[in-house]
Image: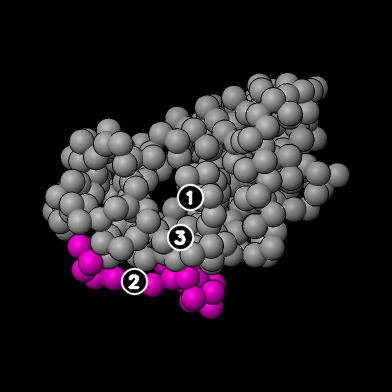
Amino acid sequence: MRHLLSWSNWSDDEIRELVDFAVYVKGNRTFYNGSMLGRSIAMLFQKTSTRTRVSFEAALTEMGGHAIYIDWMSSNFELTDISFESRYLSRNVSLIMARMKKHEDLVQIAEGSEVPVINGCCNLFHPCQSLADMLTIRMDAGVLAGRSLCYVGVHNNVVNSLIEITAALGVNLVLVTPLANDGAVIDSVIERGKKAGTLSWERDISHAVRNVDYVYTDTWVDMEFFNDPTFADKKKERIELMLPYQLNHHLLANSRAKVMHDMPIHAGYEISKELVNDPRSIIFQQAENRLDAQKAAIIKLLHRNS
Ligand code: CP
């Protein structure tokens, strides 16, 4: 069974093919209307979401199918073996999308499932986001190979998926990551970027953003910890450490880079509000592209596993 838990077991060719297909899907939005008629997917959420929920649900509606929203806390997943519940689920739906706190729990869902599973963002990876990111650059620049992207922020799940997908697509990724989430730096992921020659690190943020095509940032604190009182001290420490790494007009004064952010945005922290609304920001195109990218992933996975 083919899943999309991360890009780790997708070859470069398979990733390139999927991005090309996402471009096609975006350019032919009505072509797949009705293609999911009579079919359902399950969307299981252990964490909060706006974009992931809305874009998957809208994608299914547009394709004539139905997306069933399942809130982890009001389901029976927590009462039993996760793989038993996902095995049951997969007998009712064509595909499962799950947003889990821990990657190992997502793996259990995939192990039990008899249908494809898509990772809707776990602690280690966010492949759907990175697919939409690459679709955004491709639509903006016309090509991917040779483009350059500088990620400024905490090394997190988004970074891991960016390292893997840029390695496959020949996009140069520069990381300015003074901090990493616990367990987020994964040797095999780094190795893929290094082997492709697409991954590098830079300490000097002004130098890093000067000659790249795109700059990208993300929240400094993951969603499940953002309002957690037990994380409050750590959050304060992070903000103090990371504030010099804020994306703003001053930092980008000598850069032609366009601005990306996967949202939700914490204006005044990782990015200034003015920059979000600046003409060089392609943040809202990027968020919109989640819809097309995920349609492409759903269609490809269902076709591959049929
Ligand atoms: N970028 C992203 O995954 O957004 P949500 O957390 O709102 O789904």
Earlier residue among tags 3 and 1: 1
Tell me the residue that label 1 is attached to: 141
- Distance from the alpha carbon under mark 2 to that under mark 3: 16 Å
Residue 131: image x %, image y %? 55, 48
| Residue 23 vertical placement versus 159 (above, below) | above
Residue 263: image x %, image y %? 38, 39
Q: For disc 2, does the CB lie below 8 Å from ligand 1? A: no
**Label 1 element class:** helix
Tell me the residue that label 3 is attached to: 147
Q: In the displayed structure, does residue 239 sit left or right of residue 99? A: left
Residue 299: image x %, image y %? 73, 39
Query: Residues at badges 3 and 1 in contact (C-beta under 8 Å)?
Result: yes
Q: Amino acid at mark 2?
A: Trp
Q: In the displayed structure, does residue 50 sit left or right of residue 268? A: right
**Label 2 element class:** strand
Give neighbour class at mark 3: few <14, some 14-19, many 20+ (Cα, 10 Å).
some
Q: Amino acid at mark 1?
A: Ala
Give neighbour class at mark 2: few <14, some 14-19, many 20+ (Cα, 10 Å).
few
Query: Residues at badges 2 and 1 in contact (C-beta under 8 Å)?
Result: no
Q: Amino acid at mark 3?
A: Arg
Quarter holding the C terminus? top right
Tell me the residue that label 2 is attached to: 201
| Residue 165 vertical placement versus 113 (above, below) | below
Q: In the displayed structure, does residue 219 sit left or right of residue 163? A: left
What residue is at 58 percent from the left and 64 percent from the top?
168
Q: Is residue 73 magenta?
A: no
Q: Is residue 268 visible in the rendered structure shown here? A: yes
